[in-house]
Image: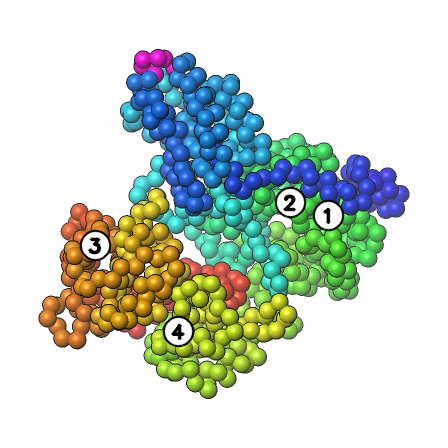
Amino acid sequence: MHHLLSCLYGRHAKRLQIGLKVEGVELHQAADRASIEKDASSSVVIIGMRGSGKTFIGELAAATLGWTFVDADVYFEQKISGLRDYVQRNGWPAFRAAEVELLKELLAQFPSRHVISLGGGIVETPAAREILTAYAKGRPVVHVARPVDEIVAYLEAESSRPAYGEPIIDVFKRREPWFTECSSYEFVNSVGAPTQAEATSPGIRDEISRFFGHITGHKANLAPIRARGHRTYFLSLTFPDVTPSLDNFEELIAGVDAIELRVDLLRARDQLDTTGPHIAPLTYVAEQVAAIRRVSSLPILYTVRTVSQGGAFPDKSVNEAFDLFRLALRLGVEYVDVEISLPEKNIRDLISRKGNSKIVASWHDWSGNLKWDSPSVDASLEVAKAYGDIVKIVGKANTLDDNIALQRFVTRTSSAGDAKPIIAINMGLEGQLSRILNTTFTPITHPLLPTRAAPGQLSFVEIQRALHLIGQLPAKRFYIFGKPVASSMSPTLHNTAFNLLGLPHTYGRLETGVVDADIRSTLGLADFGGASVTIPLKLDIIAQLDVLTPEAEAIGAVNTVIPTTNAHGDRILLGDNTDWIGIRDVVKARLPPSPGKIDSALVIGAGGTARAAIYALRALGATRIYLFNRTRRSAEELVHAIPGANVELLDSLDVASAPGPAPSVIVSTVPASATTTEEGTADALFLPSSLFSAGAGVVVDMAYKPAETPLLRLAKTSVPAARKWHTVKGIEVLLEQGYRQFELWTGRRCPRRVVAKTVLEAYEASA
């Protein structure tokens, strides 16, 4: 095929520098076959130095996957004896031999749906290294890496394990290459053995969930590239060091679906004063990836752009480039951009290692001579399709007509039977229209970046405004339905987010206590974008909808209306419920990281929001859910309303009389004005301090007027200092569920920090 391309396309095919030896579509099929098939249920093995955080990470990884955690040291002690005593009696060689047999047993006994954490010294034995290396070919062996100075500090203070008998740093240096040799992935533990505050940080939880979900294929962390009608974007970072930008990262990535790490633009501290092409050290690049992961779970597109392709990486440093690519795969990076002009053998080897990561096969022509209707572009396309999951072809526009030619090329190639997602861009000012019209992974810039990654790059906001002007992004109107809604913070939330992202939409109020003609006509408007639904309409609105999500169906209440289309292209109204997501997320963020810690929870109230609370608690794994409502009949209707939830009615809020342990999570769904801490108050629900009998917990009051409700005030004033209870205001739940609504309506992540700041300021001003 290489000869054929050379004959047909002359210099262009030679410039590709490829040696393809199969023909036609077989090239694509061979590339796919080269990638190791991975079983998403294969058990994960974790290795690393003692003190690297294997147990914490392994337990949380197992929890996020819904698998079982196995600690080899605990398993060893259960089968034989304490580790320290065993080593003292039998010596290290005997222990290492027993450890190898234990490894064989663990892999045989737990081949799937387990996370197995091994002892730090397992790699000391050649036989164990052989077993691990073989397992890592197609199955996940994760090396948990932690800075050596932190490991030394931890181990010097730890005394429960047998001493090494040599300096810790020497042990580290000897084992480090073995950990790399025996593993298929590396997880950079940036917090070591975390504090309680760090352990409950959403950032750590999210990264562990993202990493293990992606590498196992349990939940690959990929952008919605093939979603119908959804344009995707990635932000091209141009920082030499991303860490100073982390505080502003949410603002930087607002609206995008992925983050491009331009590895060729990274410069370690000792490289800052150098000029010209350069190569960032592997350790520095790994630190940069870990830094991004601390603040964002968005997919990373990992790019090493050479000088001839418009970047800063040396053209001839092929081996160094592939060292960097292999590092990306080890770190669980989701997308790797590979130039098709690189050697075929190296690309094929990379494809064989890619696992659940995706290859973006790219070709850049900076000459200005690229013609989108020429055979040379078709040649580039075929090679890129053979290598990549996504194709990227970039030229340079000289006139506006070059963008029209590009669009014809995309239309033609996208209709082919073997079409793959394609990024097609023209660089330069004249090529900006192509960036506006591109639908797959459009590279964008941001005003906070030091430079644009390429000439003609636009920001997300600029592209949205341009799409609106050319009729590709029509303005929509959104509403909140219910009564009262005059003081609702939802308009502030959504209008702030629309403005930040450059979206032309508006959000207003439609106050009514019944589903009347105004609501019915609004639902039928051509520019109706969606609605929030609050009391008293969460059940009544269902009759106006065409279909419900499984969550809304199970809860039996709707707080979100989404106009969409069915498989036949017909417009339908979809009902969803995001209340439960808001409740789940605020509780989850304050719980200890280990699973199954909610022995019991309490829900106060029996309306639509109480249903969402029960659903959320069931999703969090609550063993039993107490339910109290002043009108028992209403509460009885909820006992079996949520499938899988173990709901038990209480006759009073004196949890001392509950049939099980005191609740560690409390969610109140009744108006704050209907509650009191003064016993004997007429027409008000008395809240006893015994509610907080558990040693620690989370209390959520869904009412957000006043800011500090009687329930939250009681939690702060009556709970002894020895007991730790987190209080959550209703406005916090409103924000969380609103973020999800925004994403359902627009397909964009809500810029949380700025939106929250704006909403809270407005909320406090109105209090």
Q: What residue type is labelled 2?
A: Ile
| Magenta span of residues | 87-92
Give the quadrant of residue 158. Answer: top left
Residue 588 image position (x, y, % from top left): 35, 53
Dominant SS of magenta comes to helix
Q: Mark 2 points at which residue?
A: 359
The answer to whether residue 310 is left or right of residue 329 is right
- Quadrant (top left, top right, bottom left, bottom right) of the N terminus: top right
Q: Are marks 2 and 4 in contact (CB under 8 Å)?
A: no
* Type of colouring: rainbow
Which residue is at the front of the view, 254 or 534? Answer: 534
**What's the mark number on residue 385?**
1
Residue wearing tag 4: 538
Badge 4 vs badge 1, beta-carbon distance below 8 Å: no
| Label 2 vs label 4, nearer the camera | 4
* Mark carried by residue 659: 3
Under circle 2, the secondary element is strand
Q: How far apart are marks 4 and 3 (CA)?
A: 32 Å
Q: Which of marks 3 and 2 is nearer the N terminus?
A: 2
Can residue 477 be found in the magenta stretch?
Answer: no
Q: Picture quarter containing residue 493? A: bottom left
Give the CA separation, mark 4 to mark 1.
49 Å
